[in-house]
Image: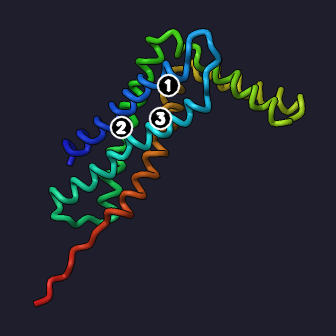
Amino acid sequence: MFKHVLFYGLIAGCVMVLFFIIEQPLVIDEGAKPDMKTGEFWGYISMLVSLSMIFFGVRSYRNKYLHGVITFGKAFQIGLWISLVASVIYVAGWMVLYNTSETLQHFPDMYLDHMLEELKKSGKTAAEIAKKEAAMRKNMELYKNPFIMMAVTFMEIFPVGLVIDVVTALLLRKKATASVE
């Protein structure tokens, strides 16, 4: 099972990182204001596409090793491991890209500016905006810690993988048919 999970998890993680490399220049243009909404849209699309490997990995394992029969629990377990491997690859990819790209090193500030702009558009009072801004700035300081950055990055992708895992386990579970003699 380990090699199977590793194979599908590596594909999912590498596809996510590849999508990120491709979409980064489309969303974050040097000297221009980044298009956060488009980036968020493509980010989730890339997660869904790459994490579809959970479905294919569980289906492949069921058909190849379990003769077409799998319980929800076993399907969930395989999907969970694929999701974990993919998430670790995603985190590693982000850490490398973040620390080697000057543009990405400014991303937290760009994101903060975007969020503050959205807050101002929301019609909140100046006091509410100031309170939220203080909390966001504190979080941005925490994000400078590599362990916090890794944890936050992991929590971007892993919950999406869990949802896909549950759906996959529900769709692919299949009981053995009783033979009638």
Q: Give the quadrant of residue 106.
A: top right
Task: Identify the residue position indicated by label 2 in the image.
Answer: 86
Which mark is nearer the camera, 1 or 2?
2
Task: Identify the residue position indicated by label 3 in the image.
Answer: 154
Count of all numbered marks drawn on residues in the image: 3
The amino acid sitting under disc 1 is Phe
The amino acid sitting under disc 2 is Ala
Q: In whole angstroms, how far apart are the C-alphas of marks 1 and 3? A: 10 Å
Q: Nearer the viewer, residue 25 or 3?
A: 25
Q: Residue 46: horizontal and vertical position, in percent?
A: 44, 37
The mark nearer the N terminus, 3 or 2, is 2
Task: Identify the residue position indicated by label 1 in the image.
Answer: 147
Give me the residue at 44% from left, 39% from top: 47
Q: Give the quadrant of residue 145.
A: top right
Q: Are marks 3 and 2 in contact (CB under 8 Å)?
A: no
Q: Residue 24: horizontal and vertical position, in percent?
A: 48, 22
Local SS, label 2:
helix
Q: In whole angstroms, how far apart are the C-alphas of marks 3 and 2? A: 10 Å
Residue 157 marker: none
Give me the residue at 51% from left, 22% from top: 26
The mark nearer the N terminus, 1 or 2, is 2
The mark nearer the N terminus, 1 or 3, is 1
Give me the residue at 58% from left, 19% from top: 107
**Left/right of residue 179 with respect to residue 36 in the rendered view:** left
The extreme left residue here reads 181
Q: What crowding class fits label 1: few (fewer than 14 Cα within 10 Å), some (14-19), or many (20 or more)?
A: few
Q: Residue 177: horizontal and vertical position, in percent?
A: 21, 78
**Left/right of residue 163 with respect to residue 8 in the rendered view:** right
Q: Give the quadrant of residue 120.
A: top right
Give me the residue at 50% from left, 34% from top: 43
Q: Is residue 160 above or below residue 175?
A: above
Q: Nearer the viewer, residue 58 or 76?
A: 58
